Image: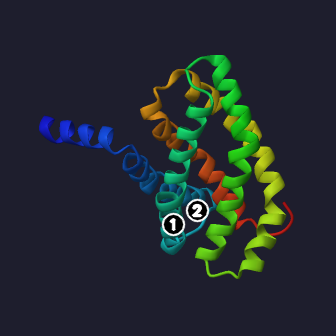
Amino acid sequence: MAVVLRRISTFSKKHPVLRGMMTYAVLWPSSNICQQFIQGREETNISESARFCVFGTLYVAPTLYLWVKISSYMFPGQSLKIAVKKVACEQFMYSPFAISSFYIGMSLLEGKTWDGAVDELKSKFVQTYKTGLLFWPAVQTINFAYVPQRNRVSVTGVASFFWTIFLSYMKHKNGPV
């Protein structure tokens, strides 16, 4: 067993994007299943959870990994002051992109038209962004200030578990937000 764990550790250090993708392959559909349970659904919608898995694994994890690399290049070092700068930059640059990508991407995976995806984005963006402003700055300040760079995507993935429960709720919320 120790040999297997050592190989997994070595592999994940050599391939951090894949480590993030594996994390998101579990966390995103799990978050969606939790949201379905919280919502009180009698049966789990596996297709819905599969869309969360595909989007989280193939899109969110790689783009988040790229963002972490870019922000680390823009703001090198690891201190509270640098973390605050990264977080501010993230809230004004990455967050709007990520939220827009989520609503557009998930809507298209559901088979909606482009116009339908854009309409959903327009109706849910502001509430999602405002909620993100309450959640992500605290998480990412700790992440950027105290977590080694190689583990930041995974730490963000764990926080993303809770954030994705919220995103799943917002995605499936009908009516005014």
Horizontal and vertical percent for residue 69?
A: 53, 39
Can residue 135 be spotted in the picture?
no
Q: Quadrant of residue 5?
A: top left
Query: Which of 54/168 is in front?
Result: 54
Above or below, comparing residue 145 to residue 157 in the picture: above
Q: Which mark is residue 37?
A: none
Disc 1 and disc 2 in contact, CB within 8 angstroms: yes
Can the viewer see residue 94? yes
Q: Quadrant of the N terminus?
A: top left
| Tag 1: amino acid | Ser
- Crowding at label 1, few (<14), some or many (≥20) Cα neighbours within 10 Å? some
Q: CA distance from mark 1 to mark 2?
A: 9 Å
Classify 2 as above or below 25. Answer: above
Q: Is 130 placed above or below 59 here?
A: above
Residue at 87% over, 65% down? 176
Q: Secondary structure at mark 1?
A: helix
Type of the residue with mark 2: Gln
Q: Position of residue 61 (x, y in %)?
A: 50, 52
Name the residue: 61% across, 56% down.
38
Name the residue beneath numbered marker 1: 49
Q: Provide the residue designation for mark 2.
A: 36
- Return the residue found at the far front: 73
Q: Is residue 14 left or right of residue 65?
A: left
Count of numbered tags: 2
Q: From the viewer's perspective, is the residue at label 1 or at label 2 nearer?
A: 1
The outermost residue toward the right is: 176
Residue placed at 74% from the left, 33% from the top?
A: 88
